Image: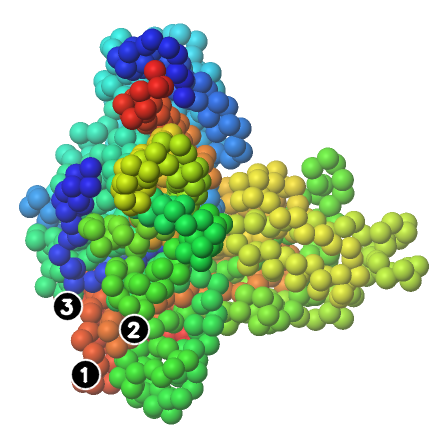
Amino acid sequence: MSAQPSTSVAGLVARRLLQLPFIVLAVYTLTFVLAWSVPGNPLENPDGRRPPAEIVEAMKKQYKLDDPVAFYFDYLGKASGVSWALGRHDRPFDLGPSLKQPDWSVNEILATGLPVSMTLGLSAMIIAVALGITAGTIGGLRPGSPVDACTQVLAIAGISLPSFVIGSALLMLFAVKLGLFPVGGWGGVQYILLPAFTLSLPFAAYISRLIRFGMIEEMGADHIRTARAKGLPRWKVAFKHALKNAFLPVLSYLGPATAVALTGSFVVEKVFAVPGIGQNFVDGVLGKDITLVMGVVLVYSTLMVVFNLAVDVMYRFVDPRIA
Amino acid sequence: MVLALLGALSLDSPLPPADLILIERSDCYTLDPQRMSYQHELRRARVIYETLVNLRASDCAIVPGVAERWELSEDRRTIVFHLRADAKWSNGDPVTSADFLYAWRRAILPDSAADYSALFFAIEGARAFHEERAAALKEFTAAAARGEPVDARALWARTEESFRSTVAVTAPDDRTLVVRLNRPLAYFLDLCAFPCFAPVHPATVERFVSFDRATGRLVQRHDWTKPGRIVTNGAYVPTVWRYKRDMRLELNPHYWNRAEVRAKSVECRTIENPNTGVLSFQSGGADWLTDLGPEYKTEMLAERKAYLARFRADVDAGLARGALEDDTVGRLPPPGPGERRDVRGFDAFGTDFFSFNCRRALPGGKANPFHDARVRRAFALAVNKQELIDRVTRLGERVASTLVPPGSIPDYPVIEGLGFDPARARAELKAAGYEDRDGDGVVEDARGERFPTVDILYSTASPRFQNLALAMRDMWRRELRVAAECRGKDSKLYKEDLKKGNFMVARGGWYGDYGDPTTWLDLQRMGNGNNDRGYENPEFDRRMDEAEAETDPARRLARLAEVERWLFTEEVPLLPICNYVTVYMYDPSRLGGITGHPRLEQDISVLERRDGVPAMPERGDGLPAMPERGDGLPATPAAPARESLR
C-alpha cells in the first residue's frame, strides 16, 4: 500500500491512473517476450493436413508473425486505440483476431467470457468473505476450543485441497447424486453456486485465518478490556469493536485476492464447464494464440491496477490513520 | 453488488430445451465450410450447409442434395449437375450454380490457406490457378516490401479473370453447374459431398472481404458466420452461438427437404473437461456425448459387455432378423448394477500407426538404419499388436496391418500386411546385416558396430502415445535385441522434430477424408505435405499413377489394393497398429439414428429422441427409416450398412 502523507484521495487516484499506462506497458512487454518464445506456429493445425509452406509464410506476414518488433508496436497501437486516434485503423481498442479461432475476434471472446468470469469471481469473493469471517470469528473468540480446532482443520483443508478435487466431489454429490444443481454450463443462479463455492474455499480459508488471528489479538487489547469493563456484552464488543479492526488485514488482502479469483479460476471453469476467460487464456497460451494471450493480459492487468486502487481508496475511509 | 450479480444472471437465462442435445469436447473453430478441418466442425457443416450431393450416413451412399440429378459425359471427365428449383437459402434466396462457383473459388484460392484446397485439384485448371495466384501474391509481397506501387484490387481483377479462363467449372445458367476433371475420377461425387464443397451465400460473405496491403491477399473477416447474419442452405440455421459454450440450430424454414429433418432444434454444448461431460450426460444433460474422453471408458465399455452378455441370445436373435444392434439393445430390459448400455465403441475411419523415418540420413548426417526396407520390415514383424491392444490401448480395437480400414470403402478388398512373426523379424534384420556377433545380447553390423539406439518419438499429449511407445520399445529390445529409447515431447516440439526428420520411429495417425483409398495412400507420395516419414520412392508414385490411370472403377480399386499390399508387405514406411475406436455415449432406448458404418459420418438431422422403448420396426432391416433424399433416381449401388459389433 503506498501511503504518503498529506495526499487527498483524489490525488491518490490521479497518481495511480497516471501510473497505469506504464504498469500495463511493462506487463505487456514481459508477456510479449514470454508468449513469443513459446515454440510452435499458431496458424498450423495440431493434427496433420498442412497447408503449403509459402502460404503459411504469407499468413505469418499478414499477422506480422514474421517480425516480433513490428507485431509488438502494431498490436500495441491497435489495442490502445492510438492507431485509431491517428486515423490508421478503423476501430479503437482492437485486440485483433484470434489466430486459432478465425470466426472470433479477441474482443468478442472477451465480451462473452469476461462477464462470466467476473460474475463467478465476485460471487466467489462474496462467499469467501462471508464464510471466512464467520469461521474466523467463531474460532478467534474461543481459541483452543474444539470449535476452533474444527474451523482450523477446515481452513487447512480449504487451502490445501486442489479445486479440481473439491469441484469434482461437489459435482458428484450435489449435481449427480442429489440432482440439486445442473452439471456444468452457465445461465442462472443454480449454475453459479457450486463453482463459486469451490472457487471461494481457499480464499475463505485464508480470510478465516486472518480474522481468527486478528480477533485473538484484539480481544486481549486494552480498548476491548475497557469496553468490557464498562459492562458491554461480549458479543457487542466482539462484533462492534474487535471485528472492525480485525477486518483491516482482510481488506488489504481482498484487492489482490479478487484479481486472483477473476484470473485464476481456470481449473474451476474447466471442471464446471463454465464458459469464462480462464479456459480461453490457457488454451491460448498452449496454442500460441498470441493475439488472444496479449489481449487477455492487457485487459486483466488494467483490471488488476484498478482493483488495487479501489482497495486503497476504501482503506482510507475505513482506517483514516493511513493517509 | 449481490443484486447486480443476480440481475446479470437472470438476464442470462438458459434457452428453452431443444429437441436434441449434444455434448462436444470442443467448439467449432469456424463455420466457414471452406476453412474447416476438424471432424466435429465437418459434422455440423453437413447439416448447416447442403452440398450438390449428400452422403447418406447409414450406408455412405451418394444421394441427391442441391443437385437433383447429374450426368457424366462419355469420357467420364465432365459432370453436369442440375440444381433443384426448390433449393433455397435460409433467407429465401434460391441456391444457384453461381453460389457454388463462388464457394469453390474461395476454396481453391491460396489466400485463405484452406486445409482442403488440394481436394479441388481434381478439377481441370484448379491447380494451375492456385499456383498462379500464389506466385502473383509472392511477387506482390516482394514488390510491396521494396516500396513499389502495388494495387491489390487490380491483381484481384486479373485473378478473377484467370479463374474464369483457367478453371473448368462453369455455370451456363442458374440451375446448371458443369465441372470438367483432369481425368476420370471415380470418387469425385464423394468429394462433392464433402463440406468444403458446400456453397456459401455470396452476398453475405462478400461484405466482409478486404485486401491485405502488405501481401495483396484477400482477407476474409468471419463476422458473417455469426447468428443473425449467417445464411445457410442446409437443414438448420445457427440461431445462437456463444463461444465455447453452446450453439443452437433451428430448422431452416426454407430447406427443401425439411419434412425429413427429425429434431426441429438442436443444442450443441461444449464441455471440454471429459469427466464433466460424462457427469452431465448421466444427469440427463444430453442425448449424445460425441467423444467419450475419460480414461475410465475402458471400464465403461466392460460394463456394456457385461450387459450384452446377459442378453446375448436376444441380441443375436435380433441381429439374425436383420435389426440394428441399437434397436435390439434399446428394447432390452434396463441394465442392472455393474452394467450399462449407454456407451458404445465404433471402429472409426482412422488408423493409428508409428512412422518409420525413411530418409537416407538423420539430421546431423548420421546414417539411418531405417532407410533399409528390410530393417523396417523387421521392426514391423516384431510388434505384437494384439498384445498392445489388450494391454495398452484397451478399447478392443481391430488390429491393422495396412492403412485403409476394412469395409470402409465399397468394393475395396481387405488387405493383409505384415503380422507378428519374431523369427522372420530376426531373419530380416540379419539379412540387413545385423546380428548378435559377440554374444552380448545386442545386434551388431558386419564391422562389429552396434545397431544405433532406436529413437522413438512420441507426443506427450496423451498417455496412450507414451504407453504404446514404451510397450513397443520393450518388444523391440526383446525380439530384435536392439537398444531403444523413448523420447516424449510436448505436441508442438514433437511436431517440429517430425517435420525435421529428427526421429527413427515416431507416433502418427490418420483419419480418411473421402471414400477412396487415395485419401490414405497419397500420404506416401513424394512431396505430400503430410509425408512425415520422408518416404520418397519413385516406384511407389509410378505404381500409384498407373493404378489411378485405370478408368474402370473396379479394376482401379483392385490395382490400388495391389499397391497397398506391396506397400505394407515390402516397403513398410509406417507400422499400422490398429484402427481407432470412437466411443459415443448415448442410450439406444432414448436416441435413434446413430450409424455404425465404418466411415462413421453421423447425420445430426436424422437423430431422433425416443421416449423409452422403440416400437418393433415393421421392416426386417430395422433401419429407422432414413430420409430418402432421392426422388425416383436409380439408387447408387451402395454397400450395406456394415456395422461393427462390439
Mark 2 / mark 1, whichever is N-terminal: 2
Kindly indicate whether the residue at mark 1 contacts the one at mark 3 (C-beta within 8 angstroms).
Answer: no
Protein chain holding label 1: B
Give the residue number, with chain letter if any, for mark 3: B632
Residue with the mark numbered 2: B587
Place residue B126 in its image quadrant: top left
As measured in the structure, the alpha-carbon distance from the residue carrying label 3 to the one carrying label 1 is 29 Å
Give the mark toward the camera: 2 or 1.
2
Q: Are marks 3 and 2 on the same chain?
A: yes
Q: CA distance from mark 2 to mark 1?
A: 15 Å
Q: Residue at x 41, y 45 (%)?
A: A140
Q: Residue at x 62, y 48 (%)?
A: B488
Left or right position of B575 against B28:
right
Q: Residues within 10 Å of mark 3 (few under 14, many from 20)?
A: few
User: SS class of the residue under badge 1?
Assistant: loop
Q: Position of residue B349 (x, y in %)?
A: 42, 61
* Position of B310 relative to A187 (above/below): below
Report the mark closest to the observer, 3 or 1.
1
Q: Which mark is residue B9?
A: none
The answer to whether A64 is drawn above or below residue B242 in the figure is above
Which residue in the structure is indicated by mark 1? B615
